[in-house]
Image: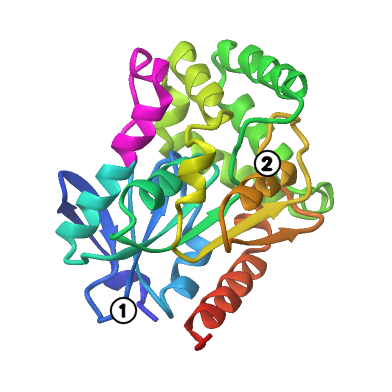
Amino acid sequence: MTAPEARRTIAAGGHSVLADPPDGKPLLVLLRMAARGAGLWDAVWAPLGRRYRVAQFDLPMPTTAALAHPREVFGALAEAACDVAEALGHARFSVFGWNGGCHVALRAAASAADRIASCLLLGPFHAPAEPRVVERGLEFLRVMYERGDPRLYAYYWFLSGLSPRFVAANFDRVEGWVAQRVAGDRFLANDPARALAWMRALRGAWLTDDELASIRCPTLILAHSLDLWHAGPTAEMAQALHARIPGSRLHVLTDVGSLVLLEDPGRVVSAIDTFTDDKRRPA
């Protein structure tokens, strides 16, 4: 396992990348729009480092104009992930997408199949079966975001992504996470029009069924059972992707929401460890 102090921020593929030093392990690239400074991956970095050389870079936030074409946006972000991996010296690598990062991971798995060794998805979005529920959820987000109070938005984001039981017992930790996100996450500083265009883009399906069916790398889809802000991602969205990706494995984490990596990171790591062990066993 790589100690935190051994990680270095380096320039790779035109991006600033936080990465473990080369150690002979396969590379795992973490993908999520929330900035590295938000600390959302901190609890799982070291456990994942038992099996992988872990790396993360801040995905460049698309312009409002670019977000009129989400398919191209996610394609460009997938290419950026491939560029980073190549610059780190890995011709093949694994991707771990979380929420919006799942679109990027899936695009890489479909379009750069020779580069992607495995695909891990946590809380993926997909076009909802009942879009009106998501539309009302997005209206709540729009009103909060346009108020221009990043602290209020951050509180709602954490309170809706964590289970009520966890919030009641750990509110001091929630307050600390809110402060960290407000201070370190550039997403909260974006103009409302761009942020809302991004939120809407996340809740679409940007690979065709044929493209999803073409994915052949081992794929683990981790879903959470709680959706307390009614805008996804949901377990139903994960199930829809699972039905479209041949050989994928679906694991639903019960009684937790979209921020399970903060609330109970051990459950996520355990599911990934089991998946990794199983795919290494001879058929």
Name which residue type carries label 2. Met
* Residue at (43% x, 16% y) in the render: 194
Q: Which residue is mark 1?
A: 25
- The CA span between labels 1 and 2 is 32 Å
* Quarter of the image where one finds residue 55: bottom left
* Residue at (22% x, 75% y) in the render: 22
- Residue 89, image x, y percentages: 16, 66
Q: Can residue 37 be seen here?
A: no
- Residue 118, image x, y percentages: 43, 65
Q: In the rendered view, how is the structure colored?
A: rainbow
Q: Is residue 183 magenta?
A: no
Dot 2 surroundings within 10 Å: few (below 14), some, or many (20 or more)? many
Q: Can residue 5 be seen here?
A: yes
Q: Is residue 109 left or right of residue 225?
A: left
Q: In the figure, 181 relative to 65: above or below?
A: below
Q: Is residue 89 left or right of residue 34?
A: left
Q: Which residue is mark 2?
A: 237
Asked if marks 1 and 2 touch (Cβ < 8 Å), the reply is no
Q: Is residue 65 magenta?
A: yes
Q: Earlier in the sequence, mark 1 or mark 2?
A: 1
Magenta segment boundaries in residue numbering: 59-77
Name which residue type carries label 1. Lys
Q: In the figure, 128 relative to 145: above or below?
A: below
- Residue 245, image x, y percentages: 56, 53
Q: Secondary structure at mark 2?
A: helix
